[in-house]
Image (spheres, rainbow, N blue to C red):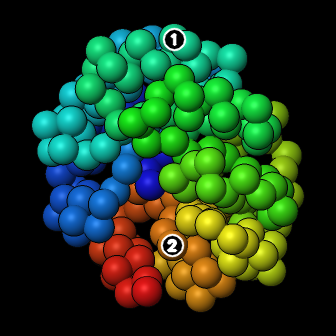
Amino acid sequence: MAATPPQGTVDDAIVLRWRDAGALELGLVLWLREPGASPRELVVGRLRPLLVRARAFDVPIVLGVATAALDEAAVIVRAEGLAGVHLRGDPDRTGLEHARARMPGALLGRSSHDADAGDHALVAYTCFGPVFGPRTRMQGDDKRPHGLPALERCATAPDAWVLALGGIEPDTARECVGAGARGVAGISAFFAADDPALARLCAVVRATP
């Protein structure tokens, strides 16, 4: 899962590098994410060219939103033909149930910083992290790495389908897969890595059982 950088211009040609590295054939999902942005701002602002290019290559796109913005997000998802939403901020069970009821056919994921969060059956995937120290720092983000044991506990919970986030590169991705992660998510891993590094990362994920 490719999470967009928190600020700055994003070159939409990155989608071509994802294709050439083999990421698209692995089922790459684009997570539109920007601190403080509303669902509408995510699709009409600086990320618009990337959205258009990714959609042209049939890359599934999810909007990173808070549970309070679900009603607006549902409208945007339908209007733009997006895959669904990614709920940020460790949504509780009530928020997850509301999201599922509001968008029954959409892809629903969440961010979690709690290895024992539970409720995995309510989402398609859980993005757990940071596992290692993030290479891209968000303003005000002082979360400490949870480590591989916490990832393993989260990934092996009943009904869990977990993506590892935080400090992901080829070597750390291999460790995350070994701990039970079904895939990886990141910013630098997809937007700042050189092509050989991204290809190696894809090879690790491809070997996931």
Query: How far separated are the C-alphas under marks 2 and 1?
Result: 30 Å
Residue 172 in view (yes/no): no
Q: Which residue occupies the foreground of this view, 163 or 77?
A: 77
Q: Residue at x 76, y 39 (%)?
A: 93
Q: Residue at x 71, y 30 (%)?
A: 95
Image coordinates of residue 196 in percent, x first then y, are: 30, 74
Q: Which residue occupies the foreground of this view, 108 or 174?
A: 108
Quarter assignment of residue 71: top right
The type of residue carrying mark 2 is Arg
> Which dot marks residue 206?
none
Residue 104 in view (yes/no): yes
- Work out whether 99 lies above or below 13: above
Quarter assignment of residue 134: bottom right
- What kind of element bears circle 2? loop
Question: How many numbered dots are placed on residues in this image?
Answer: 2
- Work out whether 101 lies above or below 202: above
Image coordinates of residue 147 in percent, x first then y, are: 79, 74
Which quarter of the rendered picture does the C terminus lie within? bottom left
- Work out whether 162 lies above or below 113: below
> Which dot marks residue 72?
1
- What kind of element bears circle 1? helix
Q: Mark 2 — residue?
A: 182
Does the residue at mark 2 contact the one at mark 1 (Cβ under 8 Å)? no
Q: Which residue occupies the foreground of this view, 45 or 160?
A: 160
Image coordinates of residue 165 in percent, x first then y, are: 62, 60
Left of 191 or right of it: where is 110?
A: right
- Work out whether 91 lies above or below 26: above
Image coordinates of residue 74 in percent, x first then y, are: 46, 19
Left of 8 or right of it: where is 78?
A: left
The type of residue carrying mark 1 is Glu
